[in-house]
Amino acid sequence: MNKPNEPLYVIPNRYRKMENLHIVFWLLKDISWCMTWRVLGIAMIIPTLTIAIVIAWRTREFKSELAHNLAIAFWISANSLWMISEFFRFDTVPVWHGLEGKHLALIPFITGIVILAWYYIIQRPKEVEEHHAVTL
């Protein structure tokens, strides 16, 4: 239930349909990973990641949504890299200083965390302060 004067975040129906389709692609990608269906798993990276990027682009005017949607896009990238490392058996191959192939996925995972940290540590306090100033 909305509080009086609380702003609403409304998603157009065509965007919601795209988000729902995104979930289907994501599940197909992960099921393919689980079942080691290489071709389908790798093919599903393209629509899953593309839709994640489109969603992030469409929400760019809302810093909170943008940060979270970018984190999702980086999560999908990391997840896809990890999947590929297992499919092509370089997941346990030493890469650098004790890190293995699957650890390359840490780069996009950490990028997503940094984006969310920036939002919650720097951007969100500014938004709260601005909102508080407006309501006084």
Image (cartoon, rainbow, N blue to C red):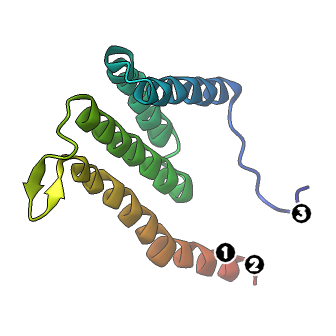
Residue at 58% over, 23% down: 21
Q: Given this view, does label 1 or label 3 mark the residue nearer the observer?
A: 3
Of residues 87 and 106, which is closer to you in this image? Answer: 87
Looking at the rendered structure, the kind of residue marked 3 is Lys
Q: Which residue is mark 1?
A: 131
- Look at the picture and state if 3 lies above or below 55: below
Of residues 18 and 126, which is closer to you in this image? Answer: 18
Outermost residue to the top: 39
Secondary structure at badge 2 equals helix
Q: Given this view, does label 3 or label 2 mark the residue nearer the observer?
A: 3
- Look at the picture and state if 24 lies above or below 1: above
Crowdedness of circle 1 by 10 Å Cα count: few (<14), some, many (20+)? few
Is mark 2 in CB contact (under 8 Å) with mark 1? Answer: yes
Of residues 60 and 36, which is closer to you in this image? Answer: 36
Return the disc, 3 or 2, that comes first in the chain's sequence. Answer: 3
The image shows residue 118 at horizontal and vertical percentages of 41, 70
Q: Is 135 left, or right, of 122 in this rendering?
A: right
The image shows residue 102 at horizontal and vertical percentages of 25, 47
Secondary structure at badge 1 equals helix
- Look at the picture and state if 15 lies above or below 43: below
The image shows residue 1 at horizontal and vertical percentages of 91, 55
Looking at the rendered structure, the kind of residue marked 2 is Thr
Q: Which residue is mark 3?
A: 3
